[in-house]
Image: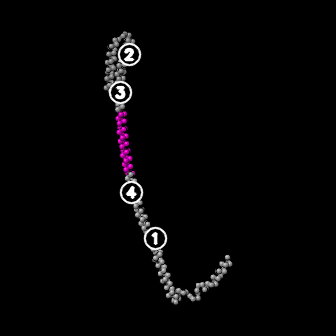
Amino acid sequence: MKNLYFASCIVFILNTNQAFGAKGGMPQLNTEFWASQIFWLILIFSILYIIIWKIFLPKITDIIENRKSRIIGDLNEAQKLKENAEKKLSEYNKIIEDTKKEAKKIIEDNKKKLENDIKSKKQKFNEEIEKELMSVEKEIKNLKKSSISSINKIAVEVSSELIRQIVGAEMNMSKVSAIVEDISKKKVEKHLWL
């Protein structure tokens, strides 16, 4: 394989002078070939122009028009989607606002209900406290009355016993009782005014 490659390189180098046309010069600059060159130039560029104009240009125009219509369609669809999204967003915001208002109303209603409930329970509690206080005051008054009479009895008994032990004679119980009651009334009135 190397030999074949080497041989073809040597043949190429030997025929280089004939391959590049060094003997006759450049044919493009030779005036006898200009007419044929112009003819072929016009023919080839005319055919190329017709092929481009009739085959490639309509395809390119169709592709451009298809892209343009697709882009316009996509833009219109995007605009519709944007409008739809904005509409959904406004509906969503409205739902949120309505929900907030409703929640606020529920909270306020429950707050009022709770306040009324607390107020009624507080009033009941105050009434019960008042009843208890009145009951306790009544008991205290009864206890005072009963304790004063009990104290008076005890005072009469103690006084009569002391007088009997000091004097050595029995005293009239009604006189001792009258004296003790008189003294206790004066003391009770003095304490009531304080």
Nearer to us: label 2 or label 3: 3
Q: Secondary structure at mark 4?
A: helix
Asked which quadrant contains residue 137, the reply is top left
**Sequence-earlier tag: 3 or 1:** 1
Is residue 87 shown above or below 178? below
Q: Which residues are magenta?
A: 96-125
52 over 142 or under it: above or below: below
Amino acid type of disc 2?
Val
Give the distance between the C-alpha atoms of the residues marked 4 and 2, in whole angstroms: 102 Å
The image's mark for residue 63 is 1
Lower sequence index among marks 4 and 1: 1
Distance of mark 2 from mark 3, alpha carbons?
Answer: 33 Å
**Any mark on residue 87, and which?**
4
Residue at 31% of width from left, 23% of height from top?
189
Q: CA distance from mark 3 to mark 1?
A: 104 Å
Q: Which circle's residue, 4 or 2, is located before the other in the chain?
A: 4
Q: Earlier in the sequence, mark 1 or mark 2?
A: 1
Which numbered disc, 1 or 2, marks the residue closer to the eye? 1
- Alpha carbon separation for disc pair 1 and 2: 134 Å
Number of the label disc, if any, that sits on residue 135: 3
- Horizontal side of 141 relative to 7 (left or right) equals left
Q: Report, in whole angstroms, how far the alpha carbon at label 3 lies from the one at label 4.
A: 71 Å
The residue where tag 2 is placed is 158
What's under tag 3, amino acid-wise? Ser
> If the image is split into quadrants, where does the C terminus sit?
top left
Looking at the image, residue 174 lies above or below residue 78:
above
